[in-house]
Image (tube, rainbow, N blue to C red):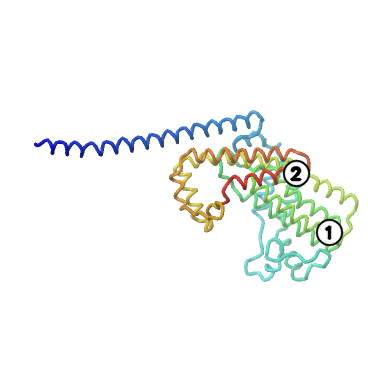
Amino acid sequence: VSSDAREAAGKGVAVPVVLQVLLGSVVALHCALIGAWDAGVTAQLDSRLEAIRRAGDPVRLADFNRLLPDPPPGRNAAPLFEQGGERFRDLDPDDPLREHLPYLGATIFADPHELVAAPMRKAVQALLARNADALALFRRAVALEECKFEFDFTHGLEVKTECFVAVVRAGRLFALEGIEQIECGKEDEAAESVRASLRCGLALYRQPTLFQHLGGTFCCEVALAALARLASRGNPSPAALLRLEETLRATADQKWLERVLLGERAWGVSFFPHLLTGAGRQMAVQTLQMIEDWGYQVGTWRLRPPPEVLYALPGAYFKAVEVYSLDFWTELLAASRRPHPGFFLARQRIERQFDESVPRH
């Protein structure tokens, strides 16, 4: 073999070796950077979680098993709500009265100063008559101070919703009952029904997750709609008004806001580790695929990468998002413990900072 051929062969071997070294260096540098990022955000995450533990707050949803002890026998409203929910019967889908039914149908009440229209009142009467047994159980439930539903937070995100739907239905029924009693001139009874509707909201406020809190807020909203009618067209006794005022004051207690913020932060701590697994990312991708207008707003640009991009993101990314999420909820919690109106002013500042720091989805 000539010297020129050997030189050419040597050069042919040398080029791929250089490329391999360069590619290996790039991959090694990439892994080192990802590893350093992961180590940094893991340390930040651990320090945040340790600070929560030192403060005595729940870290994960499972910690609420300790913070929500079982009520004494016979003192828990939850079973009664569940039994009432099982007996609840809506108007039939083809019932012509259904379209006139407020809260459970598509109609809303007229001005609180006006009489309830005859078709609407007939629909309310039909629903109340159909749910006399459910209302009796709901009435026993709201007479109790404690409410804990039978589910175990150690199972993470798997929480039954049927029991909470029953409480929302109870709140609606009591509001409708109160309005019917106003029309009948039973003003003290109407005040008690409005109070019962508010107490349905309190039963859900005692629970630690946002969707339960939102159900409680809905109960309070329909109760306030009935209360507006009672204030406009009724004149309850001072004793009935006093009981109603005490319950209204209880619904405004800031501890309910603090509890739901604790629950949302703990929900996030329980949720984010799922995104470090293949099954968790698959669930997130499937969720995003069902959202038509998902994406990121960066300046004037609307970015819409395919949801499958989540499969390619390193675990450090999700840990960094969790750190930011923890900081956000922790700041909101600190603000919620301030006297009114300090929380509302602080919340505006925190939410503005959040909007400026994170791309809008």
The image shows residue 140 at horizontal and vertical percentages of 75, 48
Does 254 sit above or below residue 57? below
Classify residue 330 as left or right of residue 25: right
The image shows residue 178 at horizontal and vertical percentages of 79, 58
Q: Residue furthest top?
A: 54
Q: Which is more toward the observer, 343 or 90?
A: 343
Does 43 sit above or below residue 187? above
Amino acid on which disc 1 is placed:
Leu
- Residue shown at 77% from the left, 71% from the top: 118
Tell me the residue that label 2 is attached to. Answer: 144
Classify residue 60 as left or right of residue 238: left
The image shows residue 267 at horizontal and vertical percentages of 59, 41
Mark 2 to mark 1 CA distance (whole Å): 25 Å
* Mark 2 Cα-neighbour bin, 10 Å: few <14, some 14–19, many ≥20: some
The secondary element bearing badge 1 is classed as: helix
* Mark 1 Cα-neighbour bin, 10 Å: few <14, some 14–19, many ≥20: many
Q: Residue furthest left?
A: 1
Tell me the residue that label 1 is attached to. Answer: 230
The image shows residue 237 at horizontal and vertical percentages of 90, 53
- Residue shown at 67% from the left, 71% from the top: 96
Write down the quadrant of residue 49 in the picture.
Answer: top right
Amino acid on which disc 2 is placed:
Leu
- Residue shown at 47% from the left, 45% from the top: 281
Which of marks 1 and 2 precedes in the sequence?
2
